Amino acid sequence: MRKNLLIAVLATFAVSGAATFAQTVRILDEAPLDRAVDFPRDDLIARFRQMSTEGIRTMRLLEGGEYNVNIRHVENVTPETFVTLVHPDTIDVWVVQEGSGTLLTGGEKDGDRQIGGDERFISAGDLIFIPAGVPHGMKETDSITWLNIRFPEHRN
């Protein structure tokens, strides 16, 4: 059942102790367990434009509790303003749709900062797998948009 929740959630993160930003997450629908869901390219492109225009960083296409499917969009990130994330029990898969930038993964998380790790340039068409517990963040970009599929890590 499509509920079209369109819920805005605000979270505030400190960035290097200097500036802060509010992250808006729009949740569009609950993930069904009884049918497939399609996201036509034209609809995704319209969402990309909406995110850029409205300053939305995360649009959750499907919310499934332990897993979700998101569009992520960031602009004007510099080494001084980037934020490191770590999901202890969640795997991230990124599929870059538009733009490019420098991704930093690995190393150690110290507050909102990341010390060490591997930097690499990513751009449209790239697919990135980030294991649970690995620090990561876009270190530098003018603009980048990616599909972000998150699911729990299950260890036997």
Image (tube, rainbow, N blue to C red):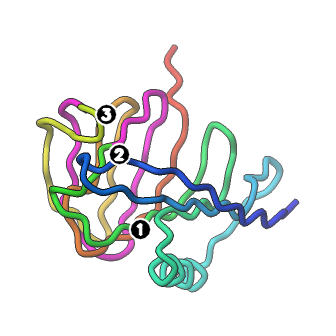
First of labels 3, 1 by sequence position: 1
Q: CA distance from mark 3 to mark 2?
A: 10 Å
**Looking at the picture, does residue 145 appear above or below residue 20?**
below
Does residue 131 appear left or right of residue 58 in this picture?
Answer: left
The residue pinned by badge 1 equals 73
* Residue mark closest to the camera, 3 vs 1: 1
First of labels 3, 2 by sequence position: 2
* Residue mark closest to the camera, 2 vs 1: 1
Prevailing SS of the magenta stretch: strand
Q: Residue at x 54, y 59 (%)?
A: 70
Q: Residue at x 63, y 72 (%)?
A: 39
> Which segment did they paint magenta?
85-109
**Looking at the picture, does residue 123 appear above or below residue 33?**
below
Residue density around tag 1, few if under 14, some if 14–19, many if 20 or more, within 10 Å:
many
Closer-to-camera residue (118/14): 14
The residue pinned by badge 2 equals 129
Residue density around tag 3, few if under 14, some if 14–19, many if 20 or more, within 10 Å:
many
Disc 3 marks which amino acid?
Answer: Val
The residue pinned by badge 3 equals 134
Spot the residue most to the top: 156
Give the structural element (helix, strand or loop) at label 3: loop
Disc 2 marks which amino acid?
Answer: Phe
Does residue 8 appear left or right of residue 79 in this picture?
Answer: right
**Residue 87 magenta-highlighted:** yes
The quarter holding residue 61 reads: bottom right
